[in-house]
Image (cartoon, grey):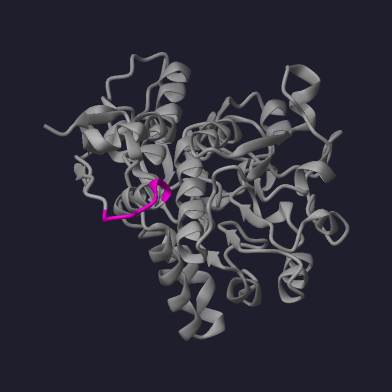
């Protein structure tokens, strides 16, 4: 039986931690990148995101008994060490999957608008078919695209139409959704490198919203510079927050690792580690996530297409009203006017102060009878409130 209040240290950028955990113990908030062992001398629960590395150096000689990461990935966690100490660990796998998939959709529609492309009928190579990749597949099919899947680990345990990497890299669009792994049977470190990039077509649209280390930065910069690749959308970077700014200036759209930063996705991550912490402590969860979320900024969109506007252009306008990906790129571009030594902190600042972004299903769509054909497309993209215009 505990005789002292539970001490909780949390990264300062995790949303709704105060609302969720204040009833469980005493909360201390710290910058995620600077949490160190000396901060944890009396800590029972440690709550972090992917910017905090959790290993023996951090946890040795501390009383930490539970680690919760509100991020989907786990490459920042030494799980072997946690198991050796019998410290339970909970991640938020899948919590922001829909947010990342919507980022891909927003990116594709933005490129279609910018370059006058039609997405329908294009092949899309999806590398990594986990929580995110499955949703990207669903949304791409709604847009009339043809998914080609690559996931070696998944192909060993389940039925997917797995295709070899060179075939997938030959698609019209290639999007990465793998974890970052150094070891094992299928390491992903620099999966895309000087050799594998040779399989891409000069027109290939390339998206990385997985982890920066999955792509060799210099190899990507080289193929862009030599026009061996088409438009590029990059959200994740090697060495964050000290990224390669030459690469940023070369890509078509670059963003500061915010693909999964919808408020819904981040709140889901907090709820997942809150539930796991309650289970660890043997208490009943009382925090109601639904009551904490505010209404969306864009509560309703009435579709009023212009004459001769294509269906894809209509969809692009709808998505842009909810999430303008180009604005994220513009915000990151402003950092180029600052001193190079300041940019790492400013990169983190863009993430910390990221504006509220809500997912598609939070917005009502008023659909004219003349556009009823778009209903299944909108539903496939994740819009759940589609109301006929009267």
Q: In the drawing, does residue 74 fall left or right of residue 171?
A: left
* Magenta residue check for 310: yes
For the point 42% across and 48% down, the residue is 312
For the point 47% across and 48% down, the residue is 103
- Place of residue 76 in the rendered image (x, y in percent of width and height, measured from the top left): 64, 45
Q: Quadrant of residue 18?
A: top left
- Place of residue 34 in the rendered image (x, y in percent of width and height, measured from the top left): 52, 58
| Image: 67 above or below 208 | above
Q: In the drawing, does residue 300 fall left or right of residue 262?
A: left
- Place of residue 239 in the rendered image (x, y in percent of width and height, measured from the top left): 66, 63
The C terminus, quarter of image:
top left
* Magenta residue check for 83: no
Labels in figure, total: 0
Q: Quadrant of residue 367?
A: top left
* Principal secondary structure, stretch drawn in magenta: loop
Q: Residue furthest left?
A: 390
Nearest to the observer: residue 135 or residue 113: 113
Nearest to the observer: residue 96 or residue 109: 109
| Residue segment shown in magenta | 306-312
Q: In the drawing, does residue 353 fall left or right of residue 88?
A: left
> Can the viewer see residue 67?
no
For the point 36% across and 49% down, the residue is 319
Nearest to the observer: residue 2 or residue 275: 275
| Image: 135 above or below 306 | above
> Can the viewer see residue 190?
yes
For the point 77% across and 48% down, the residue is 169
- Place of residue 348 in the rendered image (x, y in percent of width and height, measured from the top left): 47, 63
């Amino acid at each position: 039986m505990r005789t002292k209040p539970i001490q909780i240290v949390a990264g300062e950028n995790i949303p709704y931690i105060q609302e969720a955990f204040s009833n469980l113990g005493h909360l201390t908030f710290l910058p995620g990148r600077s949490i160190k062992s000396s901060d944890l001398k009396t800590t029972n629960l440690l709550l972090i995101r992917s910017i905090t590395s959790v290993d023996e150096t951090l946890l040795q000689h501390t009383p930490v008994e539970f680690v919760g990461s509100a991020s989907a990935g786990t490459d920042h966690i030494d799980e072997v060490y946690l198991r050796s100490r019998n410290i339970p660990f909970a991640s938020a796998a899948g919590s922001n999957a829909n947010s990342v998939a919507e980022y891909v959709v927003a990116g594709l529609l933005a490129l279609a608008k910018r370059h006058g492309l039609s997405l329908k009928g294009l092949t899309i190579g999806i590398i990594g078919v986990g929580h995110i990749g499955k949703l990207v597949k669903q949304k791409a099919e709604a847009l009339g695209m043809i998914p080609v899947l690559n996931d070696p680990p998944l192909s060993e345990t389940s039925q997917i139409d797995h295709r070899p990497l060179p075939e997938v890299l030959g698609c019209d669009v290639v999007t990465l959704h793998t974890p970052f792994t150094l070891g094992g049977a299928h390491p992903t470190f620099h999966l895309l490198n000087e050799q594998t990039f040779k399989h891409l077509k000069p027109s290939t649209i390339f998206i990385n919203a997985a982890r920066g280390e999955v792509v060799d930065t210099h190899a990507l910069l080289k193929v862009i510079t030599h026009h061996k690749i088409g438009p590029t959308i990059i959200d994740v970077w090697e060495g964050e927050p000290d990224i390669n700014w030459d690469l940023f200036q070369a890509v078509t759209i670059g963003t500061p690792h915010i693909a999964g930063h919808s408020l819904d996705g981040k709140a889901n991550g907090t709820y997942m580690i809150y539930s796991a912490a309650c289970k660890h402590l043997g208490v009943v969860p009382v925090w109601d996530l639904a009551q904490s979320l505010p209404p969306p900024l864009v509560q309703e969109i009435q579709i009023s297409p212009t004459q001769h506007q294509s269906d894809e252009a209509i969809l692009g306008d709808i998505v842009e009203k909810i999430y303008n990906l180009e604005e994220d790129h513009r915000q990151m571009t402003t950092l180029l006017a600052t001193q190079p030594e300041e940019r790492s902190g400013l990169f983190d600042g863009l993430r910390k102060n990221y504006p509220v972004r809500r997912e598609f299903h939070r917005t009502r769509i008023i659909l004219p009878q003349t556009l009823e054909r778009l209903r299944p497309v909108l539903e496939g993209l994740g819009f759940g409130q589609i109301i006929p215009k009267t």
